[in-house]
Image: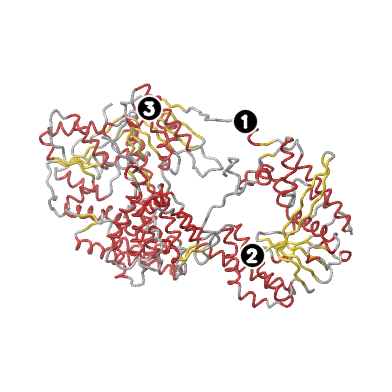
Amino acid sequence: MKSFLRKTAEHLIAQHGFDELREVAVVMPSQRGALYLKTQLAQLGERPFISPKVMTIEEFALQMTNSELIDPISLLMEAFACFKEVDQQVDFDRFVSWGQLMLKDFDILDLYLVDPIQLFSFLSEAKSLERWGLEYGEDQPEKFITENTKAYFKLYDHLLEVYIRLKSRLESLGLVYRGMAYRKLVENLENGLALAKNFKKIYFVGFNALSKAEEDIISMLLKQGLAETLWDADEYYVKNKFHRAGNWLRNYSHPASQNYLSRGPFLWMEKHLLEDPKKVQIIGLANPSAQVYVAMEAIRKWAYTYGDQEQVALVLGDESLLDQVTQYIGEFKDRLNITMGFSIKKTQIFSLINLWWDLTKRGVDGRFPTAHLMKLWQHPLVQLYAQYWSKHKQIDAHKLLISKLGTDNLYVSFDTIKEINIPILHHVLVHTDSDFSEILEHIKSFIYQIMLAYPRNEWDEEAEAVQQAFDVCETLGAAILDRFPISYASGKILLMQLLQQQKLTFEGPDHSSRTLHVMGLLETRTLDFDRVIVLSLNEGSLPGTRKRESLIPTDIANMSYFSLPTFTQADAVTSYHFYRLLQRAQEVILCYVQPSEKSSIKEMSRFIKQIRFDWKKKNPQLVLEEPVLELGKLNKEQEEHVSSIEKTDEMRQKIKEVLLKRGLSASSVSMLVTCSMKYYFSQIVGLRDEKQSDDDMGADVFGTWIHKVLELLDNEIQEQHGGRMDQVDWKEKISHLDDYLNRAIREIEKEKGVFELEKGFNYVLKEVAKTILENYLQASPQWVNEPIELLEVEGSLETQVGISVDGEIWPVKIKGRVDRLDRLGANTIRIIDYKTGKVEKKDLKIGGDLMSELTSEDIKEKLFQLWLYKFLLGKELSKPQEEREEYLKQIHTPTAHIQPGIISFRNLSATILTENIEFSENQSLEDFLKESEQLIAHWVHRLLDPSAPFEKTANLEDCQYCDFKGICHREV
């Protein structure tokens, strides 16, 4: 079947012959289409000839107005300078976050020839009040005006003035942004000015959704007899007034329409989708990766059946799949053409620059956290440099660094890093209050050191990414040269935005001869293929998410007077590109990912539903299949095998060792009941989650932090007041909470990592912690009237119990950590556990009897914990006084009353939550301890029960925050 570009090439030659083509211009939607059109012309050429001038419509607008396009960073700088003239209060740190949106809106206003005065006056306070009054039926809409709305209207008043000033400023510099060039060309044509370059004929080829400026440019050139249009349209969507793919072409192709864009008959309206034989397969798969396997198998099959000269397109609806595709598609390298760029965000240099920012922002008072410096040092690119430096200096860079840092230092000073004298490290010595131009020079030098270290004979895609990052830094440096000062924060935003836009291109021999193309949907414009595979045909991918980034409200943009583009138009554009791709394809495979409760993937694309219920009816030659594929599904026996672990004799011996060395605790018993597989991983295998370094502290660190503050406070009370709580000046303690919080975080840094407390979410958590502790310190002294004496802080209690197992006595360790142990009055010994989470009375309520509650499979962990505390303290007090822990030697056991309790910081109104922990009324301590050993025996036998293997929990919600969900393949 003849492709659209082949047909276009034949039409050009038929109209002008080879000799006249040099006087013709061809304007197309993309550079890729232009390249392939030239290829088609060359194939038709009987002898050498000069090609027509083929360009994109943006290039056409610039060339026809003799305009030069300003680069994005310079445009942002000029826009800020204009805004500063209008509003002296604006600062660049704030402007950089929304300035890009403003410029995008200016571009759209010009592309759609909107009168900025009318638009921005329509958004003024007076007009908005009038509109709100009508919309909400309010006689006095001025009541909506607040300080925030005044600032809102002030912004729109400023935007008009900035728009006018910016255009004037750019004109004086001989520069334009895209929309400005389009509007300028429209105005030139309206005023009868000639184009900057003369052509015998200008062809506009393969367009669809044109902006108002583009429509007017083509329309005026058609009327002048200078232009001709060639369209790639199909009656299937153009003649169906409800089909979005034909939204624009219906008007462009209808002679009675005021938007008719053709000189003579409309060229071309085809019927490929209505009449051509086609085979379409729709395949739903369980996960995104499975789509790649389906695509590879289809390409192999087609190559075997039809040869490798047919044109095949693999279109990625989700461009993140490119990583996986490139891993498997290498077998087709001789015919492969990857038109998509590989994002620099996925390269090592991008992650290294992020680490550089992360380290430098933590430089406080001339020092860095050692852990973060080492994280940067261990990055592969820095290690590459370290090897290069070590080889040239005959010194082991790593040993030198470690010798200077030491093993226990949490922080390293700038002076120490200077003394090490490894050049690359000198470029992390940045003061964040410096001007960004100075900081950027450090980043450039940092990257340059890595470029020097890269072996020339090993120059690969990672090295290319390093070079590209360096070039971006140089471009940014030139753009901000001699400008106003830019802060560290704003500079970071600018640089990272630029880097994220960069892509590595896949290079190889002449792409025009390649027959297997990996591309995004937009890159398929004007191109045709024999066979097509589309992956990730889900809502949110194809079509994309309904996300609109603009300072202009959607209701205003949608008004017919302005007709600015919104997500509705974006959906229609995607629809056209999708159906145009299918027009000449003989065979199509459409893959989508089946949504599930465990994933964020949305439902299958609406395009699939349209194919099922509409296209199938319209084209009798269409063969539609929906095969069901099952990739690597485990049989039932295999599933059972991997989801449970039997308690063999060997396993029982391991359990025996665990009971002796690690013992039983409230958390381990709870783990056994809720998910015995988690118990197995944690207690028997001894797996621990490798905690990732994170800027924001998690709930575990927050809880540890609160506990550490209370430990510091309680230790001070013991040292300064002998543990007497009634002698404490609580107001004084509260006034120093900031100091306690800072001391506490320093003490837990070795274990939990370094956290910045004065910024971001950590600052919020610090304020929350301060509020929690202040509320507690104010309330707790009022809870009891009797004197309280602190006996122990952050102590541990443990004992060993002999349990009979198959006629053998197994020693079982019972252990518990006590946050605080005190004496209330003369005889009550309290064991207090602090909880940052919420605990309520119902969590400790004994429904029937204590033994039944504590042996239930629906165990109350907090109640079990209270029992455990009483048991451990009871065992300690039952010893002779001289064998007890030092702080319990003076306790008179016969009169002592043990009271375990919990203080819940999210339920302080409940004071100390406790329960009468005894198996029978008025039970003696001796009897309590005997029955407690029966309880321990129950859980030991439950743990050893061969009929109850270690199994995954059936409740997936329990897996959400589990450290082992990855091992169990339960990422929920």
Vertical comparison of 200 with 898: above or below: above
Q: Residue furthest front?
A: 394
- Tell which circle, 1 or 2, labels the residue nearer the N-terminal end: 1
Is label 2 in a helix, a strand or a loop?
A: helix
What amino acid is at disc 1? Gln
| Residue in the image at 49% along x and 65% along y | 759
Report how far apart the C-alphas of labels 2 and 3 lie in the structure: 66 Å
User: Where is mark 2, residue-wise?
Assistant: 708
**Closer to the camera, 654 or 321?**
654
Percent of width and height locating residue 732: 64, 78
Q: Which label sits on residue 638?
A: 1
Quick check: 433 left or right of 630? left
Residue 121 is left or right of residue 670, and the answer is left
What residue did someone put label 3 on? 587
Q: Quadrant of the C terminus?
A: top right
Q: Quadrant of residue 923?
A: bottom right
